[in-house]
Amino acid sequence: MDEQAATALYELAAKNGNAKAQFMLALRLAEGRGASQDEQAAAGWYTRAAVQGHAEAQCNLGVMYEQGRGVKEDAGKAVGMYKRAAEQELAEAQCNLAHMYVKGNGVPKDDFEATKWFARSAAGGCPEAQLLFGLRCSIGNGVPKDWCEAAKWWLCAAEQGDPLAGLCLACFVVDAVSERPPKERRKLLDLLTRAAEGGQATAQFVLALLHELARGTPKDECMAAVWYTCAAEQGHDRAQLYLARMHEEGRGVPKNESVAAGWYARAAEQRCATAQFRLSLMAEAGRGIPKDDSMAVELLTRSAEQGHSEAQFRLAEKHHRDDTVPQDPVEAYFWSTLAADGRHADAQRLRDQLAPIMTEEQVALAERVVDLFKARPGPSGQS
């Protein structure tokens, strides 16, 4: 059945008072699926379904009131819709309601209420709420400070694919575990170990970090390599990167540059800028893989485009004085400027060397391209 036919059937059922059909019709009108996009009409059908108690319709109508889409912006009405859906245990609405209490939007600011709704939403499986409730547990905002409770919720969110939850575990927990009292440290390590043994890739990665860095547990690079391998085999890009470094350097595992290159390649395929950079060095030198200047430049460029400052600097140097790419002062100036902005120690020096040998038009062009690059949407920074 095509989209237009499906929308027509939903409309027929919606006009007969079916709440689910009213919700589905509103969803399609809001998205422009099988009909022209019409947010005002969508809000009308969400309202009809909401009156009948349809929780998802209530939540979506709340979003429309909060954002002023299809209806006049009204934070108070948004809160009312979120509450009705939240009381039916719709986790997304509970999370949205918590945000309203955080911002004081449509209701007075209230950290206690915000925490209560984040907790209920987290328990209902909303990964955003699990992340944010975990943060509140880690700092004691509205609940007693409890790193183990924070880690538990971050693990739940990470298991659903929330990248920030994994970052919280990798940064905050690794930094905090050594400072915790022995009893709390054991509890935190037990929590991570159980999750890791149960196959949770983020827990495996964090546990590997703890063993590698000797945080809360004795330094054990062999055990770190074991857990990195477990996580890497599940596609965890940071684990793939760290495992590759261990194979490249012979830490915790026998030194094997071919294996290292394989893991760098898998992480590079997932747009890990550092893996792309490390693999480019191996391709350029012929370490672990056949020497391939073309492949090296391609990987270096992909890494540089994601904001890796060392890749940007090396690419600038290549365009300045390397025969593997065309010599181009504009390209060299462009990449050295980006690297300097990323605080690369030698990039400013290279740019200062380039400026006197370039025309004013070339410098202006390079700076214009820098501005366009910075303004583009998309990921940046070193990963």
Image (cartoon, rainbow, N blue to C red):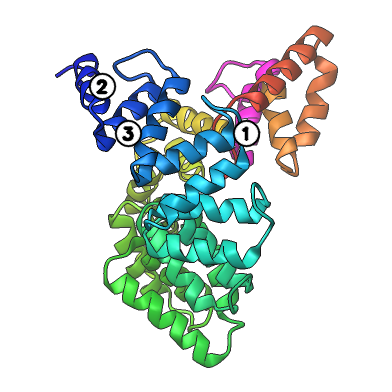
Q: Are marks 2 and 3 in contact (CB under 8 Å)?
A: no
Q: Is residue 226 above or below residue 338?
A: below
- The amino acid type, in three-letter code, at marker 3 is Phe
- The residue drawn where x is 82% and y is 20% is 355
Task: Inspect the magenta stretch and tell me whether residue 311 lies in it.
Answer: yes
Point out the frontmost of discs 3 and 1.
Answer: 3
Left or right, 271 with respect to 4, comes to: right
Q: Are marks 2 and 1 in contact (CB under 8 Å)?
A: no
- The amino acid type, in three-letter code, at marker 2 is Glu
Q: Is residue 252 above or below residue 7?
A: below
Crowd rating for badge 1 (residues with CA inside 10 Å; few <14, some 14–19, many 20+): many
Crowd rating for badge 3 (residues with CA inside 10 Å; few <14, some 14–19, many 20+): many
Query: Mark 1 = which residue?
Result: 312
Query: Mark 3 = which residue?
Result: 23
Q: Position of residue 145 (x, y in %)?
A: 60, 78
Circle number at residue 139: none
- The residue drawn where x is 37% and y is 43% is 56
Q: Position of residue 135 (x, y in %)?
A: 57, 65
Q: Is residue 310 above or below residue 234?
A: above
Main secondary structure found in the magenta portion: helix
Circle number at residue 11: 2
Q: Position of residue 278 (x, y in %)?
A: 48, 45
Mark 3 or 1 closer to N-term?
A: 3
